[in-house]
Image (spheres, grey):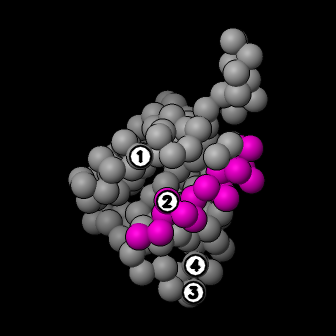
Amino acid sequence: MDDHDKSGEVARASVMVIDDNRDFREAMEQLLPRLFNVEVRSVFSDAQTALDYLEDDTVDLVLVDFKMPRMNGLVFTETVRKRPNPPKIIVISFNPLPALREAVMAAGAIDLLSKSDIHDELGPHLESLFGTR
């Protein structure tokens, strides 16, 4: 991500949201740009479609649900992290157990965040990753 755009303003981090819950996807698409200096560039209901998108495009950060049909967030993380220049990945879950956090971080995710507390937990990560909040 470039630090500044052509106007000299700090560039917004680009975010991809992957979640099989339509309400959660829509909420993140609306709330993230309002709460943080980010652009939600893409939203997907399944991880395989998101992987296909990442073949031709890139984002700075992926927020991916752990529990999804076809491919869960752990497998998605392992797959994406094997690629050259992968985006940062944060896995999200309603039940962020310590063993699951260890597994997703071992796969290359930055962290596992609780869906119910994401608005509080995401800010510090965005600040440390992109200098934006």
Mark 4 and mark 2: Cα distance apart in space? 18 Å
Give the secondary structure at mark 3: helix
Region rendered in magenta: 116-131
Residue receiving disc 3: 98
Mark sitting earlier along the chain (3/1): 1
Where disc 2 sits, the SS reads helix
**Earlier residue among tags 4 and 2:** 4
Graded by Cα atoms within 10 Å as few (under 14), some (14 to 19) or many (20 or more), the crowding at tag 3 reads: few
Q: Which residue is mark 2?
A: 119
**Residue at coordinates 66% horizontally, 28% vertically from top-left?**
11
Residue 31's mark? 1
The part of the image, by quadrant, that contains residue 29 is top left
Find the distance from the CA under tag 3 to the CA under tag 4.
5 Å
Tag 4–tag 2 contact (CB < 8 Å): no
Verify CB contact (< 8 Å) between mark 1 and mark 4.
no
In the figure, is residue 33 to the left or right of 81? left
Q: Residue furthest left?
A: 22
Please say if the residues under marks 3 and 4 sit with CB atoms less than 8 Å apart.
Answer: yes
**Amino acid at pointer 4:** Arg
Instruction: Return the x and y of residue 64 as percentages of the image width and height.
Output: 45, 58
Tell us which disc is closer to us: 1 or 4: 1
Q: Are marks 2 and 1 in contact (CB under 8 Å)?
A: yes
Q: Which residue is mark 4?
A: 101
